[in-house]
Amino acid sequence: MRYEATTDIKASAEAVWEIITNPQTLTEGGLGISRFEGALGLGEKVKLWAEVAPKQAFALKVTAYDPAARMEWTGGMPFGLFKGVRQFVLTPRGQGTHLLVTETFSGPMLGMIAKSMPDLQPSFDQFVDGVKRLAEKRR
């Protein structure tokens, strides 16, 4: 199971990176994240609450962190029974940046868990649209 959202942003990769790695912007920027705890950096553990599932906390580990290029958050259940990997990929394009955000879910319990999950596509679209709006406003 996979979700994906993408957009082209008229701002540098560094400007986009600043938005997606700032906990305050993540929660106050209209990006679909209502609460965020922790610091973003390779190996760091974070916790977030999404507007799409406000009562559920998602415990994640930052498993990739390449400034202004790529970040990855991984979470799930022990022994790989259920795993979610969210990737943020920034690619320079002309005078701007292409932002790709994906999340891939896997594991033997995926079928059972997927039945109780809300449709996450609207929240992915909200995230990339919000990052675009914020980054282009700061130019």
Image: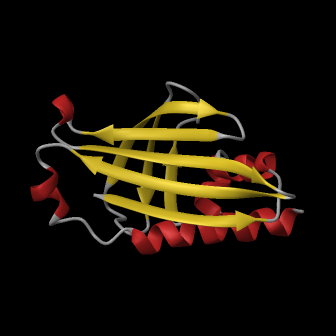
**Height in image: 62 above or below 29?**
above
Taking the image as shown, residue 125 lies to the left or right of residue 84, namely right
Residue 26 lies, in percent from the top left, at: 61, 56
Residue 30 in view of the camera: no
Please report the residue visible at 46 percent of the width from the left and 55 percent of the height from the top. Answer: 102
Q: Which of 92/3 is in front? A: 92
Residue 101 lies, in percent from the top left, at: 53, 56
Please report the residue visible at 78 percent of the width from the left and 62 percent of the height from the top. Answer: 135
Please report the residue visible at 24 percent of the width from the left and 65 percent of the height from the top. Answer: 117
Q: Which of 34/97 is in front? A: 97
For the N terminus, give its image quadrant.
bottom left
Residue 136 lies, in percent from the top left, at: 81, 67
Residue 99 in view of the camera: yes
Taking the image as shown, residue 93 lies to the left or right of residue 102, namely right
The figure's colour scheme reads secondary structure
For the C terminus, give its image quadrant.
bottom right
Count of numbered circles on the image: 0
Please report the residue visible at 44 percent of the width from the left and 47 percent of the height from the top. Answer: 86
Please tell me in which quadrant of the rendered image residue 51 appears.
bottom left
Q: Which of 18/9 is in front? A: 9
Q: Which residue lies furthest to the front in this view?
A: 94
Q: Residue furthest bottom?
A: 122
Residue 24 lies, in percent from the top left, at: 65, 52
